[in-house]
Amino acid sequence: MSDLIIENGRIIDGTGAPAFDGSVLVRDGKIKAVGVAADKEAKQLPGLKSIDASGQTVMPGLIDAHCHLAFDDAGSNAEIFHQRRNALSALVAAYNARKLLRAGVTGILDPDSTFENMIDLRDAIEADIVEGPRMSCGAYALITGVGGTAGRLINDEGTTGYYMAVNSRDEIVSEVRRQIKYGADWIKVHVTGIIPRQAHKGEMCVWTLEELQLICDTAHELETPVMGHCRGAEATRRAAVAGFDLIFHATGMDDAALREVIDRKIPIAPALTFQANMVDFGDKLGTADYLMKLFERELTDSVESMTLAHKEGVPLLTGSEAGFSMVPYGDWHYREMEVFMKYFGLSALEAIQCATQKSAFALRMEGETGTIAPGFQADIICVKGQVENDIPSLGNPDNITTVMISGAEKDLSPPPERKPIPGWRLASMGSRLSREVVFGPEAEPEPLIIEELH
Ligand SMILES: [Zn+2]
C-alpha cells in the first residue's frame, strides 16, 4: 500500500453535495486530505505517487448492499440447491469477484450463501489471498418449516442451498448463536415465503412476531444485526417492530408498515434492479408479456411508499440482487441508482449517496467508508466523464480507470474467458415438442419418408 495523490479530478464526495474540482491525498490506506489541503500536504512529500484524473470523476467506490456472490448467475433455485459444490462455488465466486472490482464495486453485503461459504471468501479477501471487494456476510438464510420462496424444493428441516430451516424456539436460538460463532456479520431471515397452494396471494409472512423478536434478541445480545427478506406489508411491519436492522425489498408497504419503518429509520434495500431489467429488457429474452407487467407492478406499487420513506429520512441502500442470470456480475451494480431516480424521484447525487455513504451501513462501516473525506478508508474509484450526468457510464468497465480499497489499487484487467464446468448448470431438455409445434394447429402430419432421414 503506497501513499498517493489523485490530482485534477472532479470529486463527488458521496454525501449528496455537488461535485467540485480538487485533489485527494491517500496515506496509510486512508484519505488524509481533500482539495487545497491535499495539494499543500503533498508538496511536503517528495516522490509521492500521483494519479492524473483529468476529465474524470473521483468518487467513493460503489457498495452493493445485496449481492449473492456464491450463486454464479444461476438460472434457477434448483441449480443453486442441487448442482453446486462447496469448495468449487467458493473458487468460482473468487473469479466473479474480479468482475465486481472492474465495475467499480468496492464493497458488498452478501446476504446468504450456499454452504455459507462466502464467509470463507470474505476471510480470504481480507487476508489478501484473493482480490475482491470488501464483504460483509450473512450465513444461511433462516426460514421456518413453511419454507422460503421455492416451495417443496426446500427441505422441511436442516439446510437446502442457502436456506436453514429452524422449527422451534430452541433451534432459532442455537442456529443464530452458531452462525455468529462461525463468522456471520449479519443474521439473514426470510420473513416471507411462498406457500404453493396459496401462491396467488404472493409471499406471506411465515413467522410470528415473537419468533422474529427472539431472533433479534439473540443476535443483538451478541452485537450482530439482523436483516430480513420482506415482501408485503405485514412482514415489513413485523420485522420493524421486532427490531430488524435492515429490510430487503419492503415492497407493498401499507401505512402501518411505513409508519413503523419511518419511526425507526430502518434502512431499506429494495433490490429492484432485477425487476427493472425484466421490465426494460425482458423482451430481449422473450419474456412473456404478462410476466413483464407483473414485474412492472412490483416497481410501480412501491413508488408511493419508497418515495415517502426517502423523504422522511429512511436510508435507501442500493442492492443489485446479482447472482442470478437476470443480473449478471459486473454488469448492473449501478442500475439501482437509476431505479431510485426514475421511480422514487431521487436526484443523481442523492442516488450516488445511497450507493456510497448510505450503503456503508450494509458493510457495518458507516462513517468509515463511502465518503471522500479525511479519515475515511481510501475506497475510491476514478471514472471517465461526469458521473452524475451519466450514471449508466458506470456500467462500462472501460470508463473505470482506477479502483482502490484502503488505498491499494486493484487489478482491472478482464478475467480470462471461462469454460463450462461439468454438472454445474441445470440441464434443460428444452420446450415441449407437441404435435402442434411440429405440424401446426390444423395440418395433418406429413407421412414420414424414411430415405430422407439418412
Ligand atoms: Zn437476494
Image (cartoon, helix red, strand yellow):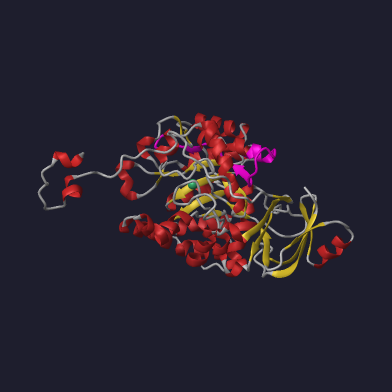
19, above or below 230, in the image: below
Front residue of 12 and 437:
437
Total residue callouts: 0
- Residue 172 drawn at (x, y percent): 51, 33
276, above or below 321, in the image: below
Front residue of 395 and 414:
414
Classify residue 142 as left or right of residue 444: right
Residue visible at 52% across and 54% down in the picture: 331
Location of the C terminus by quadrant is top left
Q: Quadrant of residue 196?
A: top left
One can see residue 244 in this view = yes
Residue visible at 67% across and 37% down in the picture: 129
- Residue 145 drawn at (x, y percent): 41, 34
Q: Does the magenta portion include 253? A: no
Q: Quadrant of residue 198?
A: top left
396, above or below 145, in the image: below
Classify residue 196 as left or right of residue 219: left
Front residue of 382 and 317:
382
312, above or below 103, in the image: below
Front residue of 112 and 42:
42
- Residue 351 drawn at (x, y percent): 58, 63
What span is in magenta?
A: 122-147
Q: Does the magenta portion include 146? A: yes
Q: Quadrant of residue 56?
A: bottom right
Classify residue 22 as left or right of residue 224: right
One can see residue 301 in this view = no
- Residue 2 drawn at (x, y percent): 79, 50
